[in-house]
Image (cartoon, helix red, strand yellow):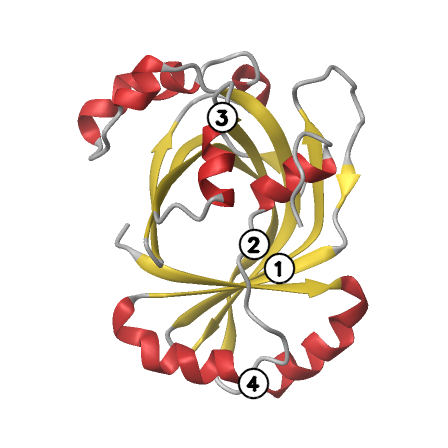
Amino acid sequence: MEYRYEIKVPISQYNERIFFNWFLSLRNISTHNASREINNIYFDNLNFSSAQNNLDGIANRVKYRIRWYKEGSTFSKCNVELKIKNGKLNKKITVPTKLNFKDILKKDFFDLIKNDLSKINFDHRILCSQKFLPTVQNKYNRAYYLHKDIRMTYDTKVNYKNLKINSINNWNTDNLNVLEIKFNEELLDQARELISSIPFVPKRHSKYLRGLSYCKMAVYI
């Protein structure tokens, strides 16, 4: 995947009517993909360096996660994902696996990806030198749209679970939905026009950091 912009707009559930009034006013919008449930497991080291780099606003950083999908009653196999941030741009390296999410929970991140390192362009030295283990799981419903050439997703029913403790049903529900606007650099002017029409302010937003906060593993506003 090429580098692209990902603009995030957190929207309180209490403001959904304002959001949908704006959304329904848009022209040239279509459904890009069927809605589905997204599940993630985030990995971090003992010092929570991935989370700390995000909090510190480090321009070049990596987020480590496993992602799978639920469509109807069917779960997909898991993908290993490296979410790489380079300044204001992002890209994602995806490595498919044959594992289901229950196979993931006791594994180190490096073990999941070591056989595929020769196929991807990624400096893996930090993964070799430190243990990256599961910290937080989340799940949410995602709707997919296309506005002209710009991708939009809308995430609702966001929930988090602490994987550092052994409680079975300790899901924590977020009160924010998230609109994401994703586009390549050549579409910047077109995207600015769309973003300027949104009745909410784009902000930095991390589901991983919010998950740590909701699970009482970090303080994040």
Say the numbered circle drawn on residue 178.
1
Q: Earlier in the sequence, mark 3 or mark 4?
A: 4
Which one is nearer the viewer's eye here, 110 or 139? 110
Is label 1 in a helix, a strand or a loop? strand
Select label 4 or label 1 by which is in front.
1
| Mark 4 surroundings within 10 Å by alpha-carbon count, few (fewer than 14), some (14 through 19), many (20 or more) | few
Contact check, label 2 and label 1, Cβ < 8 Å: yes
Q: Earlier in the sequence, mark 1 or mark 3?
A: 3
Residue 26 x, y percent position in the rendering: 56, 85
- Residue 173 lies in what quarter of the image? top right
Q: Name the residue at 30% across, 66% down.
A: 184
**Residue type, label 1:** Val
Find disc 2 in the rendering and name its residue: 205
- Residue 171 lies in what quarter of the image? top right
Is label 2 in a helix, a strand or a loop? loop
Say the numbered circle drawn on residue 26.
4
Find disc 3 in the rendering and name its residue: 44
Say the numbered circle drawn on residue 11.
none
Q: Name the residue at 51% across, 74% down.
A: 30
**Residue type, label 4:** Leu
Q: Earlier in the sequence, mark 3 or mark 2?
A: 3
Q: Name the residue at 28% across, 55% down.
A: 3
Distance between mark 3 and mark 4 Cα atoms: 39 Å
| Mark 1 surroundings within 10 Å by alpha-carbon count, few (fewer than 14), some (14 through 19), many (20 or more) | many
Residue 53 x, y percent position in the rendering: 44, 39
Distance between mark 1 and mark 3 Cα atoms: 23 Å
Residue 201 x, y percent position in the rendering: 59, 73
